[in-house]
Structure formats: C-alpha cells, structure tokens
Amino acid sequence: MQEEKKNPKNPVWSFFSSVRLTLALLIIIALAAVIGTVVPQQEAAGESLQKLPPALAGIVKFLQVTDLYHSPWFLLLMGLLTVNLVVCSLNRLPVSLRLYRRRPGPDRPGLYDALPPDRVLEAEGGVEAEADRMERALRKTLGNVERKQGDQAVWLAAHRGAWSYFGVYAVHAGVLVIILGAVIGSILGFDGHVNIPEGGSVDAIELRGGKGEMKLGFEVRCDDFDVEFYDSGMPKLYRSDLSFMKGGEIRARGVLMVNHPLEFEGIRFYQSTYGAVPGEAVLVITGKGQRTVRRARQGERFDIEGGKAQVEILRIEGNLMRMGPAVKIGVREGDRALSFWVFKFIDAIEEQNPGITRQVPQFNAGLYRPYRFGLEGIETSFYTGLKVNRDPGVPVVGTGAFLLVAGFLLTFFSSHRQIFVRVDRRNGKTRVSVAGQSSRDPAKLDRAVARAVRIYRGEAS
Amino acid sequence: MNTKMLGWATVIYLVAMAFYLIRLLREDEYWGKLATGTALFGLALHTAGIAVRWWESHQMGLGHAPLANFYESMIFFSWAIMLLYLVMEWRIGSRVIGPFVTPVAFLSMAYASLSPDEATRIQPLIPALQSNWLTSHVVTCFMGYGAFAIAFGLGVLFFARRFFSGKENPAKGPTGPFPDEGAVEELIYHSTIMGFIFLSLGIITGSVWANFARGAYWSWDPKETWSLITWLIYATLLHARLVRGWRGKRVAVMAIAGFASVLFTYLGVNYLDSLHSYLM
C-alpha cells in the first residue's frame, strides 16, 4: 500500500480514492434500495413473480431483484463503497496528521498587520508582565499555550480542538465497523422461527430462507400463552411463559413479551406471532345404555367395546364445508375398518338436508352400531410463534454507531481554534496584538478571542 | 381539550405565516415583530396542547407520550419545525425564512386536523409500541425531519430570490428583502447537518429498539430502507459540498430533493407493505 501511495498514478488506487466514485456509489445504492422497496421481497415475491410474463420473470430472477439486499450485485456495491471509504480515508490521513501536528509560529510576518482596532490593546505594564497576564488568560480559554521570547517582543500561541481533524475518520470508521458487524452477524449468527403449542415443547427451530432445521441443544416449553385485548379490539399484550430444559430438567424459566426478549445459552427468543389451532375434540359416545365423554387430540387412539375395537381421531376441522366443527373418526374392529365424520351441529344439518346421513354414509355418526358418536365441541388451543436468533455482530454494530455519533460531534461541533498574540513596545507604550485562526468555525473563534481579552483585562475570570 | 388547543395553534400559525409574508413584501420590521410574536404564541399553545394531551393520557390510565400514532406524529413534526425555526430566527437575527418554513408547519397541523375523529383520540399502545425507546426514536427522527423541512424552506427561498431578482445574480449581493445567496446556502448546509445528525440518531435508536422488539436491528423494511435512502441523499449533499466544493444552486436542489425523500419516508411508505404499518 505504501508503494501505491507514493505513486498517485496507480489507476486502481486513484479510481478508489475518488470522491466522485463515492458520490456515484451513494446515489446508485440509494436507487437500488428504492427498487427493493417497490418490488416484493423474499417470501412475498413468489406470487407476484408468477403473474409476470416469463421473459420478464427471467430477468427479475437473473438480477435477483426479489432478494435485492442479499443479491451479489448489491453486496458488490456495498463492497465497492467499503473499499472506496478505506482508500479515501488513507489518502487523506497524512494531510490531517500534518494539520494536527502543525503549529504555525506566532511570529510569522504579516500575521498582525490587518487586525481590527479592538484586537490591538494598549497596556500600562512592561512587555514581560503583560505577556504573563495574557498567557494566563489564554491558558484559561484555550489551554495549551506556547511562549516565544524575542529581543523586543514576546509571542504567544494557544490552540485547542486539534482533534477535530480526525472527526471525519471516526465517522467513516463507524460506517466500516457497522458493515463489519453486519458481516459477522451474517456469517456467525443464525435466524429462525419456531411455533410451540401451549403445553408443548420443541428442541429445534426452522431456519429462515428455507435453510432447514437447527437443533437448539436444549428444549423450550411453552407453559402458558396469553393474549389480551383492549375494549377497542386492539391487542394489549402477548405473553408466553417459557421453560428452558436440558435432560428433562428445568434450567430456567421466563416471561416472554414483545419488546422483552429472553436469552438462554446465548440464544435469544422474541415474541413474534401467535395462532389458534384446533385442540382436543370432546366426543360423546352413546350405546348399550351407556354414555361416555372422551377428549382426544388429532391422531390419538382409544379403545371401545371393552378393547375389541379401536377408535382413532383422523382429523379435526374447526369448520368443515361451512357446516361447523367436525371430527373424522376411524374405527377398527379386527379386519373391519370404518371411517365417518361427526358434526357438532348434526341436528341442524339433518333438518336442512333431510336424509343426508342415509345418502352419505360418511356423514353417519351411527355407522358403528350400536354406538353413536356426538361432538360436543372442539377446544381451541394456542401456539406461540417465536423468532429465535443469535447475532454476535450486534455489539460490533453498536460500537460502530457510537463511533459514528462521536465522529459527528467532533466533525460538526468542534474546530481547531488557534490564537496568536504579540506583545511589544510601540510609541512608548506596551502593545498587545491578538490574531486568530479557525479550521471551521470563525464565530466560535471570535468568542474565544473575546473571552481571552476580557479575562486579560480583568473583566472576566 | 388538547385537540382544541392544537386546532387553535394551527390557526395561529396561519396568521403568523401571513404576517411573515406581509413583512417580506412590505419590507417592514413592524410586521416581522408581529409575526415572531404570533409564532411564539402559537408554539407556546402548541407545546401546552402536547403537554395536556400527555397529561390526559395519564388521567386515562394509559400514560404514554403523545407520539404513538400518525396524528400525534404530524403534531410533533410541526412542533419540531416551529421550535427549530424560531431558534434559528433568534440565532441569525433574520425573519426572511419565515414565509418559507411556517407553511410546512401549518400544513402538517392542518393535515393532522383532517384526521377522522377516532384517530385524534388518545389510544392505548399496542404491544409493539410498549417500549421506552418509543419516545427517543420518534423525537430524534422528527427533529431530523424538522431540520430538513427548514433546509427545504431555505431551498425554496434560494430559488424565490432568483425569481424575484430576475436573472441569475452573479454579484450575489443583497436583493431587496432577501439575504445573499451565500448566506442562504450556508444556512441550508447548517440545517442539513442538524437534520443529518438527528436522522442518524433516529435510525440508531430505531435499530436498538428493533433489536429488542423484532430481534433484528435492521430488516430492510420499507420504512427503514427509505430512511437509509434519505440518509444517503443527505450524505451525498454533505460530501459534494465539503469535498467537491458544490455551492449555491446544486445544494439548494439537493435540499429540496432530500426533503421529498423525507416526505416519502414519512408518508409514502405507508402505501408499501411495512412493519411500521401500525402508524397508519
């Protein structure tokens, strides 16, 4: 790199050290980002893509517009900006270092020639005494003071805020560190989703972007899920009570709410969604003078007829063919197998469609004689939808953001202020001339000069 | 109560805007003082309105800063513009920007007052908004928007000045009641810096919040993306001016284009499918 800096004609280096490139990249990235907000992205893109003519869809797929922010060409643009930022900063760093180190002498010719009258003061004391007084005043206003002794005069140089030359590097470093954090997160982190039914537990999550399943290395159980609403119907609270378990033993418990994630073994859980699923069906079985109530989930089996026959819940539907809750039952007795639907509102259905249970044996809940099945209801149960991730890039991104803001403050609110003073004799009197120089903020320098003069005169402290 | 106060503040801003215009056309500082006084009174009433709204939300047992829906955000946007403008007027000692900035504040208030009744009512917070980051995120974002609105007003002033002074004025001397081009452009630059810092803080606070709420500090959600687009536009302006030496017309054009992006970030994104859609 040292080689390249010495040779400014190196085409690669000069290409990347151009601010025009920066401006072009900023605009191009902005335009690309606009496209990404208009075209549906990722999961949402599938449907819209099918509506396009095949040729256009081909182009969209080729350019990966539907996953624009992760497409190679967008990452390339970000990469170019990163290189551009690094090269520009390295290119300008020597200039800033020189400015930071440079201390122009307070005895330069011409420095005190064009001062306004209020910057040239007359004093009663001798040159040395007045210079001492001014030195103390400068020390109070700007801090660092240097003194130069001449034959007939004394010069003072004071300065403050030389660090401000580096503010812009802090800003750029901040941006680079944020990008670095994003890269770390995308390589070392993961991001997924899992639904846990109330009372149920999981030990794996679904990774985002169809990357398959990932084992957590522990179990998460949803002990309880609650959703509360305001009177207006707006949601008020989503809350999951979770237990984290290893080897069947509870290691930690916690309450998960929106804005209040939980962490276990470095993996973070966020309340993301929830939903209702049909839970247990409540069946009433009558026959042989008996009436029994059974609760069962989909896929569950139980015995009937003293163990001679087996009943299986094949399906549970909250609303089958707009005829209300229904459960599909399978009965097996030896080689004989039957299956039929049991409706909750069977009486109303028969009233509207007389004879339906005879015409459609599948709808006859009395098919397994002499028993008759009835459905009292289906209890809905909730599942909680959790986002699960680990992102080791987050602290890095945070550091970058801090650098960025600190850099802004240095760049825009501080400036290198320098005050130069000459104390000499003129027409039999001691003369104090005050000159100043600012890297950015002349108004702030003027205030510093005015304060130094007031302190020197004893009007302020 | 609070909506009535805010309604009156809207009317007062309209009056202040008229006074600023009269001052500009008649070049009479009497009207200028009247305009400033009216604007200050409007801002005081506006501030009181927001405070009362906050207090009323506590009375209702909801207790959140009035920054939680679209209506409240418009009210705060206008408040930020007026506050920043009046501070600026005091610092630079000139009222010439008034006629170009007060309309933005007035329009924001007027548009808010057109909201349907249920939107102006104080509403409880949905779970996603129940966070301590709500206030700092909204305040920083809208202070940024406010500063950009002032830069926009200055951009319009820049071109109004050229329009009234006939052809381009190479001498860049004062033209009638307007300050010279260099001074206007300098003010655009300073407002942009202010807006840029606030927007950056707004994006950062939003990212911190999103990291708690959604488990990702950045999701390329349209609102996030548009805030980045806005940030990139103003970053371009700052670099073009600081390093490439852009001045005058180009900077004014960028300030106006940047504000268009601000408005789209704020309003237009609601028409896209966004995680921020609860603000509609």
Image: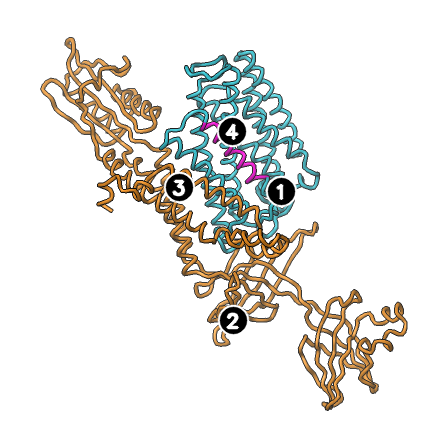
Q: Considering depth in this image, is A132 or B152 the residue closer to the camera?
A: B152
Q: Which residues are magenta?
A: B250-267
Query: Do labels 4 and 2 touch, CB within 8 Å?
Result: no
Q: Which mark, by number, is residue A203?
A: 2
Residue corresponding to mark 4: B152
Task: Look at the numbered disc 1 and give the secondary structure of its residue.
Answer: helix
Q: Which residue is mark 1?
A: B57
- Chain A painted colour: orange
Image spot of residue A261 (x, y percent)? 51, 58
* SS at mark 4 in the image: helix
**Main secondary structure type of the part rendered in magenta:** helix
Of labels 4 and 1, the one closer to you: 4
Give the chain letter for cyan.
B
Number of the label disc, if any, that sits on residue A90: none
- Amino acid under label 3? Val
Camera-nearest label, 3 or 1: 3
Kindly report the distance in space between the C-alpha atoms of the residues bearing marks 3 and 1.
Answer: 34 Å
Please tell me the numbered disc located at residue A405: 3
Residue A26 sits above or below residue B148 on the image: below
Q: Secondary structure at mark 3?
A: helix
Q: Amino acid at mark 4?
A: Phe
Sequence-earlier tag: 4 or 1: 1
Do circles 2 and 1 both sit on a common chain? Answer: no
